[in-house]
Amino acid sequence: MRIMCCLKPVPKPGSVKVDPETHTLKREESELVLNPYDRYALEAAVELAEKTNGKVVAVSMAPPNAKDILLEAFAFGADELVLLSDRAFAGADTLATSYTLACAAKKLGPFDLIVCGKVSVDGETAQVGPELAAWLGLPSVTWVKDIKPLNDSLELIRTREFGEEKIKAKPPLVITIEHEANVPRPPSIKRLLKQDEVEVKILSAGDIGAKEEYLGLNGSPTQVIDTFAPEYHGKREIISGPPEEVSERLLSILKERGLI
Amino acid sequence: MENYQGVAIFGEWTGREIHESTYELLSEGRRLADELKTHLIVLLPGPPEAKEAASELISYGADKVIATLDERLNDFRDDIYARIVAEKIEKYRPEIMLFPATSLGQALAPRVAGLLKLGLTAHCIAFEIRQEDRTLIQVRPSFGEQVMARIISRTRPQMATVRPGVFPHAKKIEGYQGEIEIFRPSEEAFKSSLEVIEKRPKPKTDVDITKAQVIVAGGLGLGSKEHFQKLFDLAELLDGAVGATRPVCHLGWISEDHMIGVSGVSVRPKLYLGFGISGSLHHTVGLQGVETLVAINIDEKAPLMKQADIAVQGDAREILPLLIKKLKKLKSQREND
Ligand SMILES: Cc1cc2nc3c(=O)[nH]c(=O)nc-3n(C[C@H](O)[C@H](O)[C@H](O)COP(=O)(O)OP(=O)(O)OC[C@H]3O[C@@H](n4cnc5c(N)ncnc54)[C@H](O)[C@@H]3O)c2cc1C
Ligand SMILES: Cc1cc2nc3c(=O)[nH]c(=O)nc-3n(C[C@H](O)[C@H](O)[C@H](O)COP(=O)(O)OP(=O)(O)OC[C@H]3O[C@@H](n4cnc5c(N)ncnc54)[C@H](O)[C@@H]3O)c2cc1C
């Protein structure tokens, strides 16, 4: 199976910088790490490639400083590394992000399977996977926690509120991976030693044949108009003192209010 | 943009009934429709037995239910559902389209957005209307920090997914009049290479914390599983359930069914007591429906302490057993009276 795995570099917690004008992330200025959920996506892709004698192409849309994250992905088992990097991609919402990834999938494909993480820890929308599938006209299955290759299809377990579903799917398709899906392997020493020799292919908007009007901030229908810290009401009761006293006080307030 | 009118919501059929989140969308959808002086429609795809639900939805304030009833909609298949919803949107052209952020809604809404090339705002917790241009201002938490973002969409319909548990359940309106319209999608819409071959319900857990009237929740501040266990004693005394933060679940102090927040559930008890919980937005988005919020924390500056109705500053590991002791005493006094 030829598998594309989408990896999102996210700002390291605590190093997030937001552009005060566009309210988008200033990704070039943040220290980047791999989105934690994408470790499970990558592991799922690599395991499946091993079982089916396939290849994993890791793809990120990110500024040039995300190269190291793709090299990391190589150590975890990815075969080819592709960084989509172009000023025109900046400020993309999920629609523009998934369009860009879709153009890359067409350029680098055909793929039997496209694997995404369940959700990113910065934008946190969980929208990119299903939107990417729609752009490509492929079916999608989200929140997958188990994958079994059959002859000409895949057997997937999807998590739902009520439990889980077993789904038979014929490739090509797009899936998003749950963190319960697997235990990601440690980096391979052999691969770590080869990191200097591997190439991270850098592709621009032109290279993937993407149309300007669908890219970046301009191609993004959603706009963040402002951000604010949630305000809390003022009339709160504050209790402090020795544990005996505060417990007594708390219980008597709750009793007064008829709550216990 | 003028030819887009009305507020639409997605009606989720669970296989037996209409999902709780649909009633929450009905209440917020009705409010938005009234504010815009327009109608409220429900898009309902499902198997033929979902038909009764259609008239039920009208009695909760829907002006029109656009139903597609077909055996092939028995299972949720992302591609089929998305095409049907997209066809309905193209025909009925609502100015606003809301989906529940359930597992189904989160899979479906972005597919629809991708098909129609529309903006989609995720996991909203509040909406405002800007009257002059009928813009829907969509509020959502972001970056797991104490930050909310206001988002607008340049495309129509303005689409969002809505966090379950945030809006109240719609009230039944006796004699409300509305109509049911059957929508027949193209045959093309039913093509799929997905097949749901089995559904396995979760083993029933003893408590469903989303329905509890009292919740005692614990976080990392409790220090150990041993201290955390005491929450069960307190919950029993208060006839309540135990809730938890995500890190605590991941440490194995309690199962994930008890997790409150973005990755867990939303709760709406009369009383919530949070022991050693910092109050990250990831957790507190699940607390929107709490009536009286009590925080117990050694750090008076912890965000949950600022949000609390009653903020108790102190060591949760000491206060928890004391509360249990005192409540036991109180209970036996009451029984003797
Ligand atoms: C405050 C704020 C709020 C926002 N809210 C919204 C909103 O409501 N709607 C909206 O459309 N956009 C929103 N955005 C923009 C959105 O965060 C970005 O488009 C983001 O780059 C992609 O979305 P995500 O992080 O939510 O990814 P998700 O959809 O959560 O990511 C799921 C998976 O998609 C893949 N993936 C995602 N991005 C990339 C990438 N760049 N490269 C490779 N793989 C990737 C990964 O496999 C990832 O695990 C918001 C931005 C900000 C600053
Ligand atoms: C994508 C994503 C999704 C997430 N989803 C969720 C979710 O659904 N639910 C969730 O809860 N979290 C979620 N999280 C994690 C969330 O961001 C926080 O890390 C988490 O809620 C914090 O848990 P906590 O309050 O138990 O721990 P901490 O933040 O470590 O807080 C511990 C608190 O205990 C106090 N404390 C310490 N000792 C004592 C003592 N002896 N007595 C009293 N107080 C004490 C401290 O002052 C502190 O305020 C998510 C994170 C991400 C990135």
Image (spheres, coloured by chain):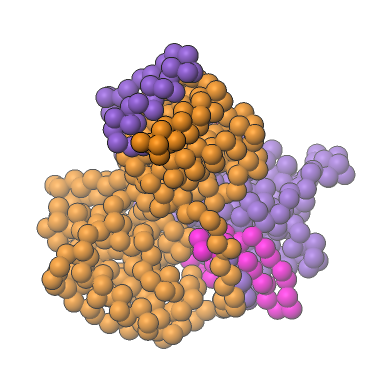
Residue B54 x, y percent position in the rendering: 28, 75
- Left or right placement of residue B177 versus residue A98 in this view: left
Image quadrant for the C terminus of chain B? top left
Q: Is residue B28 left or right of residue A138?
A: left
**Chain with colour orange in the figure:** B
The residue shown at (24%, 76%) is B55
Q: Is residue A20 above or below residue A10?
A: above
Q: Is residue A33 magenta?
A: no
Residue lying farthest to the right in this orientation: A190
Q: Quadrant of residue B321?
A: top right
Main secondary structure of the magenta stretch:
strand
Query: In x, y percent, where is residue B1?
Result: 21, 59
Residue at 46% over, 79% down: B74
Q: Position of residue A217 (x, y in %)?
A: 40, 45
Identify the residue at the far front of this view: B336
Q: Colour of chain A?
A: purple
**Which range of residues does the magenta coloring cover?**
A134-163
Residue B268 in view: yes
Residue at the spot 54% in from the left edge and 70% down from the top edge: A139
